[in-house]
């Protein structure tokens, strides 16, 4: 038999980017502990709809932790209290009957609130557009082993590439800095031979783009790596710093 | 030159400035502590250390100006960071909880930094910008620490310095890009050790002087 719990939710409700929002209290009753956090909100939303009220707006897509759409701050923790999981992977069995759960959106000047828990993370795409790519001419696929890459390097690049762009690092950072995201996106390319030719331009352009977007400055608080659902390490931030110094002081890129 | 201003003005550039000047202060403190330890050799040892130091003449002035420049950069950059980082989150969270990354040291950096600045000014007014023609440095120091209030101020200030250094030391290496799986645990260990040594090393001096002079 599945266990069910009752929760008191305090959810941030805000009708649009420029209106004042506030925490509203809801009761989530008979929630199966096998549900995910998003499914729990679905249940609450169904009731709200039946009552003729506005359902809680939140972003979601894959619901299996790979798309980076979902995310909210649950009792002060981005994506909730579990390590290495997104909000859609957070199961209600981690909560107890009678708990009060406060749900807030990512808070950053660079992420304006669209509605309720949904925030505009478009600036992350802008950072990618500034340099998070490699320019290759299309053509016949190259032989797979033409460029040897040590397994260790490939693994590190893969670790960085695991970033799903959810923005939890920004939400978790006491300074609302996006450094972990930028470092993952710079690292995944900087580590591989295919990324090297454009490394200098990329490091400078992506950092400038992030600085312009209104994020705070990283002060090595390490909250990002503690909350990142993909457990991206701050060693990537150190690599980003090295790439940026190399590009600024050692290349001709302005 | 434009590129240099852009580089140093960027978020990583400001990190670089904080890291380099911070490490500069830590090296200074190591020297300062080593010199102060001559107090345990008694009055004459301490006075002769001071005399030897001042005999270096222009080198001392150059070092002082260097430290002043470092202080201006560190304080100004720190103030900008504090202000920008506050602005980056206009609407704060109703519930705040750490995921386990921050430490007391890292969470209080701007505040401990401000207190250290106030303390340094106080300290310089006490022991540096004083007329030393008719007295010795040992006398000035022992007279000051005859007051328990001074001893207390100094001990509290040293605890705060220790907190600031506990985050600042390893953080400077991370900022400079020196984070390596083999060396980082060591750097973290040294960070704790250095802050404890500064805290106890400097913090015990006023106690010793007030008790034994
Ligand atoms: S680094 Fe982690 S927390 Fe930040 S956007 Fe990528 S996956 Fe999300
Ligand atoms: S909905 Fe795709 S990661 Fe959560």
Image (tube, grey):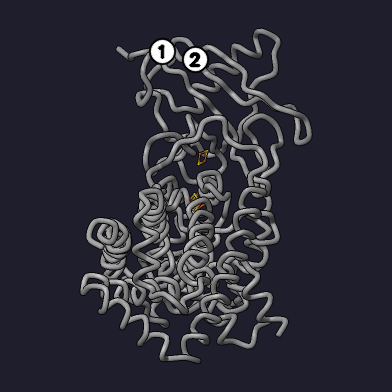
Mark 1 element type: loop
Outermost residue toward the front in this view? B134
Q: Which is nearer the N-term, disc 1 or disc 2?
A: 2
Write down the residue under mark 1. A98
* Residue drawn at the location 56% of the way across and 14% of the way down: A26
Give the alpha-carbon distance from disc 1 to disc 2, as whole Å: 7 Å
Categorize mark 1 by other alpha carbons within 10 Å: few (<14), some (14-19), many (20+).
few
Q: Label 2 marks which chain's residue?
A: A
Q: Residue at x 65, y 83 (%)?
A: A253
Name the residue located 47 percent from the left edge and 10 percent from the top edge: A29
Q: Residue A9: horizontal and vertical position, in percent?
A: 52, 18
Q: Does residue B77 sit above or below B111 in this rendering?
A: below
Crowding near pointer 2: few (<14 within 10 Å), some, many (20+)? some
Question: In this picture, is A89 found above or below B185?
Answer: above
| Residue tagged 2 | A8
What x and y, as percent, mark residue A193?
Answer: 46, 79
Where, quadrant-wise, is the N terminus of chain B in this rendering? bottom right
């Amino acid at each position: 038999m599945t266990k069910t719990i009752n929760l008191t939710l305090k959810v941030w409700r805000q009708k649009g980017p420029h209106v004042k929002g506030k925490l509203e209290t809801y009761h989530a009753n008979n929630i199966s502990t096998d549900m995910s956090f998003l499914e729990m909100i679905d249940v609450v939303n169904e009731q709200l709809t039946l009552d003729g009220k506005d359902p809680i707006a939140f972003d979601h897509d894959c619901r299996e932790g790979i798309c980076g759409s979902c995310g909210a701050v649950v009792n002060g923790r981005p994506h909730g209290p579990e390590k290495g999981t997104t909000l859609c992977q957070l199961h209600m069995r981690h909560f107890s009957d009678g708990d009060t759960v406060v749900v807030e959106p990512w808070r950053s000047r660079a992420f304006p609130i669209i509605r309720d828990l949904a925030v505009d993370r478009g600036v992350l795409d802008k950072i990618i557009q500034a340099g998070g790519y490699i320019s290759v001419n299309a053509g016949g696929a190259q032989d797979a082993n033409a460029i040897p890459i040590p397994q260790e390097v490939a693994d590190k690049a893969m670790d960085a590439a695991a970033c799903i762009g959810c923005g939890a690092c920004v939400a978790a950072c006491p300074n609302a800095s996006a450094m972990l995201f930028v470092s993952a996106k710079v690292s995944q390319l900087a580590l591989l031979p295919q990324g090297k030719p454009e490394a200098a331009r990329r490091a400078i352009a992506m950092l400038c783009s992030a600085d312009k977007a209104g994020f705070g400055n990283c002060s090595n608080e390490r909250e990002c790596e503690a909350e990142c659902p993909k457990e991206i390490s701050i060693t990537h931030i150190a690599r980003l710093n090295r790439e940026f110094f190399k590009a600024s002081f050692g290349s001709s890129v302005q | 030159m434009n590129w240099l201003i852009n580089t140093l003005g960027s978020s990583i550039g400001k990190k670089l400035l904080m890291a380099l000047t911070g490490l500069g202060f830590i090296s200074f403190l190591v020297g300062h502590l080593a010199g102060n330890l001559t107090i345990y050799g008694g009055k004459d040892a301490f006075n002769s250390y001071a005399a030897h130091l001042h005999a270096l003449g222009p080198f001392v002035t150059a070092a002082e100006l260097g430290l002043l420049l470092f202080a201006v950069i560190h304080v100004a950059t720190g103030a900008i960071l504090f202000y920008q980082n506050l602005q980056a989150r206009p609407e704060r969270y109703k519930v705040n909880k750490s995921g386990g990354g921050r430490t007391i040291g890292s969470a209080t950096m701007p505040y401990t930094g401000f207190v250290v600045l106030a303390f340094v000014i106080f300290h310089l007014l006490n022991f540096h910008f004083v007329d030393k023609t008719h007295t010795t440095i040992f006398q000035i120091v022992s007279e000051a620490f005859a007051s328990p209030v001074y001893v207390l101020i100094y001990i509290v200030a040293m605890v705060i310095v220790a907190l600031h250094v506990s985050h600042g030391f390893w953080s400077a290496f991370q900022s400079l890009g020196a984070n390596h799986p083999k060396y980082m645990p060591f750097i973290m260990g040294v960070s704790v050790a250095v802050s404890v040594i500064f805290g106890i090393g400097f913090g015990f001096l006023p106690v010793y002087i007030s008790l034994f002079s």
